[in-house]
Amino acid sequence: MIYLILIFFLLILMLSAAVYAVVQKDLLYAVIATGVISLVLTAVFYMLQAPDVALTEAAIGVALTTIIFLITIRNTKRHEDDYNKKDNLKSPLK
Amino acid sequence: MKKFLVILILAVLGFHLFEAFSGLGLGVTRFEKGVKDYYLEKTVSELHVANTVTSIVVNFRGFDTLGEVTVLFLAVSAMGGILYKRRHQTGDRSVLFSSSSIVRSGSKLLFPAIILLGVYVFIHGHLSPGGGFQGGAIIATGFLLMLIAYENFSVSHNTLSYIESFAGIFFVGIGLLGFMNGGTFLQNFLPAGVLNNLFSGGVIGIIYVMVGFKVAAELTGLIYTILHEKD
């Protein structure tokens, strides 16, 4: 019972972090949220008796992917533009 | 508007995935007979390997692992090629900046421990959870920490490519030695040893050490190339 409650809590945490990453306009926060998803996913994998996958997820998902995204943000720009604005002429969607 | 559309699509997808997976039941035996029984039995009785996942990945499905290593190599090569061109167009530019002394001291303290953990994980791949990929990724994380903390910490690209090439050739060479002993590619030709000993499982330990070196060298080189755009 405690196992089920814990795993549902972790899954809900993952879902909310994912929604936050999609909605957030500050890309730095969005990347940290994706890192949180990977971190919680590591715990879920461990609870589902897959320690091998949990190790991979911890090393690649939490550390390497997050850092590569952070470097990308540092090389480009931190805030997501609002492409739906009428006066934004540089938008690639027009 | 676009984001809510994305969330809506994801919600629909999640609902259907949940619907599909909710009927499965966690931890319930679903396949009465299959290849899993063969693997579970042969792993302990013939190969003397404690970790079944490792024995499947390296021994029963060793050729797939060779393919995975090749895919990683190709990805890193392509990334290096793209960044090489970019580096020569933009000129000297580094994304690094000097970090505080707390980060420097902390990473100096953590670096040997992380490397040791990575080496432990890939040497004991056939005994405990983990293996070459995991250990290599952990070692690359340690190098990443040092590269971020110290601006002038550098790794030699030549050494990395020598390590990577040697590890890859050794992997394929072990696979070819299987032929010489009258078997198939990547077949075990060493004595299986005693269960739960470090020297058990035949070629699995050697292959995982090589995979660990290869993955660590590839990922470290990739991170170094991204972090130091100047040459």
Image (cartoon, coloured by chain):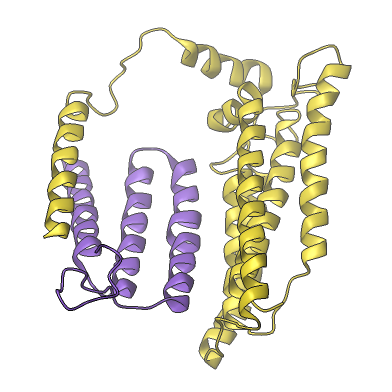
Give percent across and percent down for residue B34.
Answer: 44, 9
Q: What residue do we see at 22% from left, 25% from top?
A: B25
| Snapshot quadrant of residue B182 | top right
Q: Residue furthest right?
A: B180
Location of the C terminus of chain B (image quadrant): bottom right
Q: Relative to A30, does residue B6 appear above or below in the rendering?
A: above
The picture's colour for chain B is: yellow
Q: What residue do we see at 63% from left, 33% from top?
A: B67
Q: Relative to B152, does residue B65 appear above or below in the rendering?
A: above
Give percent across and percent down for residue A90.
Answer: 30, 74
Q: How many numbered dots are placed on residues in this image?
A: 0
Residue B34 shows up from this direction: yes
Residue B117 shows up from this direction: no
Q: Is residue B76 left or right of residue B190?
A: left
Q: Between B64 and A46, which is closer to the camera in this rendering? A: B64
Q: What residue do we see at 58% from left, 58% from top?
A: B138
| Snapshot quadrant of residue B95 | bottom right
Give percent across and percent down for residue B165.
Answer: 80, 48
| Snapshot quadrant of residue B184 | top right
Q: Between B59 and B157, which is closer to the camera in this rendering? A: B157
Q: Is residue B44 left or right of residue A2?
A: right
Q: What residue do we see at 52% from left, 89% from top?
A: B102
Location of the N terminus of chain B (image quadrant): bottom left
The picture's colour for chain A is: purple
Give percent across and percent down for residue B33.
Answer: 41, 7
